[in-house]
Image: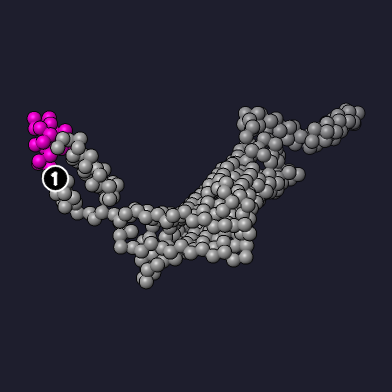
Amino acid sequence: MKRQEYMQALEEALRPYDETLSQDIMADFEAHFVYGLKSGHSEEEIITSLGSIEEVLKNIDEQPLPPKKETPQALVKIDQVKKVYIDTEEVGVDVKIVSTSEDDVVYRYQPTSSYFNINQIDPNITKLVEKDSLYLSLRSSGANKKMSLFLAGELTVCIPDNIELVKIGGRQGDILIEDLNVKQLEAKTISGDISVDGFKGEVVTLQTTNGDIAVKASTANVTVKTVNGDVSATDVIGKFMIVNNTNGDIDVDAHVLEVALKSVNGDIELQTAETIDKIYVETTSGDIELKIADNTTFSGSIETLRGDIDMEVDFPYMVKRNCYSFSEGKTVIDIKSLNGDIEVNQHGFNKTNHQEKRGGFDEAIRVLKGLKDLENLIPEDDLKEIKDLMAEVKIDLKRKK
């Protein structure tokens, strides 16, 4: 037997084993061949020293993984079905929801290779069609429910476009939604990440206790809630976006009319390309950064108790301690942080021009303060001329405003 034949046979024999383990063994044996040939040994001598394939397998401490089993694709005729409910709370599996051009729901379950799968029993998949709803459930088939904690796999469900509602409930495992086109989506898991990409619909509601949530390139009104995890939203279009987070950062780049972002322990970043009707942002221990459109103007307040505020905007505001107030603007705001800095940056803001304008304003204030006792300093005829000039200036300012 030659080197190439031996290595091919070894690779084939290692297929049932963990992939990382197999790669390590193959690399070690390849290194033996390289070293042996450099030392003047023939390929046959090296193979004899390494031992037969059967002897190699006997020396592996790890046990081979069980063969992968996949449930065949199952079709559900949905002429009357408008709602799909997916329940995986008894087993720890990932859920993947994708769009299909077919008129039926298609689903399949694929176990994942893992040492924890050894001696575990695959879950049962049950389906029930009742009135206008399809119910898909994964249940542990073993007598000992605790064993289901170590079940691993992925349930894939293909959803046609004419469905009104998709609702997913899980306990452990990630939830991935791709290119779904339904009216309403609800996804909830206790421990796992939730990702929505390319969704087109009306309403999205996402909730996880321990995990990150990400929404990308989607059109919908989005409500997100997580306890321990970060939240990100990119290229989201809708009427509103609501994010409630306890321990984690929030990063939103959205095209919405109203946005409400709240985090107890985390930074918040909001970026908008158009004007927004309402902005509510609050964090207890974290910084806030807003990047707003050029034509945005505020009405409301921005305040922090123990942080700094940096305003780089071209519209007027009033400052009292650590509270900035705005009036007569189009965007209603309420932005506050207890222990954190707040930065607001207008996209087209020119800091140099702003400082020059501010310098001119300060100079005008100084001059006006110097005119406080004007009537006592100049003759009455000259005073009339100055008052007429002041009246003209007042008119010009009104027109400019």
**For the point 8% across and 32% down, which residue is it?**
41
Q: Name the residue beneath numbered marker 1.
A: 52
**For the point 8% across and 30% down, which residue is it?**
40
Height in image: 263 above or below 330? Answer: below
Residue 356 falls in which quadrant of the image?
top right
In depth, the one of 272 and 76 nearer the eye is 76
- In the orientation shown, which residue stands out farthest toward the bottom? 143
Label 1 packing within 10 angstroms: few (<14), some (14-19), many (20+): few
**For the point 41% across and 63% down, which residue is it?**
123
Percent x, y for residue 141? 40, 67
Tally of numbered discs: 1
Residue 27 falls in which quadrant of the image?
top left
Percent x, y for residue 25? 21, 44
Question: Is 375 within the magenta?
Answer: no
Percent x, y for residue 253? 58, 42
Q: Is residue 205 visible?
A: no
Percent x, y for residue 206? 55, 55
In depth, the one of 369 and 278 nearer the eye is 278
In depth, the one of 53 and 28 nearer the eye is 53
* Kind of residue at badge 1: Ser
Span colored in magenta: 31-50
- In the image, taking residue 329 as reference, residue 384 lies left or right, namely right
